[in-house]
Amino acid sequence: MKPDFSLIPEPDRSVVKRKPLTPKQRAELLLAQNGFCGCGCGIKVNHAVEGSIDEHLNPLGLTGTNDLENRSIWRKPCSAAKTGDDLGDIAEAKRRSGEKGQYARRMKNGPTIKAGPSNWPKGRKLESRGFPKGRK
C-alpha cells in the first residue's frame, strides 16, 4: 500500500530577504550601543580597522525579522562566530521541518535514483576499475 503524502503539509518556502540598513539607521544602532559591539564582548566597534556588520539577533532563517529591534552592529570577528552557529541551527530547523535530507529530495525529484553521473556519454560501460584483467 502506498502512503498518502497529501496529509503532509508543504514546508513554508517564504524566505524573508535581508534588508540593508541605511547609513542613518546604522548610526542610530551604533549610538544606542554606545559604540560597543552588540555581542557583549565589551570591545568598541572600529569599522576602519576590523569592519562591522549589522547582525540579526534572531536570524531571518529562524523566524527573525528585519526590524531595527532585531538588529545590532557587531565586529566582524564576533559576527563570524555567531553566523557559524546560526547556520547550524537553521540547517537543523530545515531538517526537522522536512526541507532537507533524503526524504525531501525524493518528494521533490521523485523516487528514481540515477545510476552513475549524468555527464557520462550514452552507451559507455564501466569496463574496469583500474585493475589488470586476469588477476583474481
Image (tube, rainbow, N blue to C red):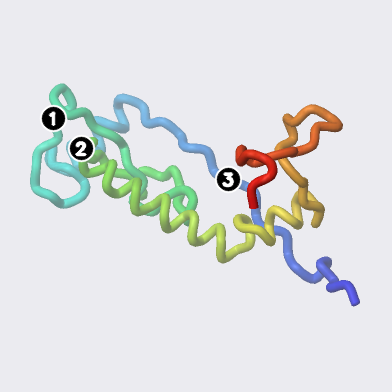
x then y, percent, for residue 32: 19, 42
Cα distance in 3D space between marks 2 and 3:
26 Å
> Along the polypeptide, which appears first: circle 1 or circle 3?
3
Mark 3 is on which residue type?
A: Val
Q: Is residue 25 left or right of residue 31?
A: right
Residue drawn 34% across the image and 53% down it = 85
Number of other residues with Cα within 10 Å of mark 2, as a class: few under 14, some 14 to 19, many 20 or more: many
Q: Is residue 101 above or below residue 5?
A: above
Q: Which residue is mark 2?
A: 75
Are circles 2 and 3 on residues that touch, CB within 8 Å?
A: no
x then y, percent, for residue 69: 34, 49
Cα distance in 3D space between marks 2 and 1:
8 Å
Query: For residue 46, which numbered disc appears in the image?
Result: 1
> Along the polypeptide, which appears first: circle 2 or circle 3?
3
x then y, percent, for residue 78: 22, 44
Residue drawn 27% across the image and 47% down it = 81
Q: Secondary structure at mark 2?
A: strand
Q: Is residue 46 above or below residue 61?
A: above
Q: Quadrant of residue 71?
A: top left
Mark 2 is on which residue type?
A: Arg
Are circles 2 and 1 on residues that touch, CB within 8 Å?
A: yes
Query: For residue 15, which numbered disc appears in the image?
Result: 3
Residue drawn 77% across the image and 51% down it = 113
Q: Secondary structure at mark 3?
A: loop
Considering depth in this image, is 134 or 9 the residue closer to the camera?
Answer: 134
Mark 1 is on which residue type?
A: Asn
Q: Secondary structure at mark 1?
A: loop
Cα distance in 3D space between marks 1 and 3:
32 Å
Instruction: Name the residue furthest bottom.
Output: 1
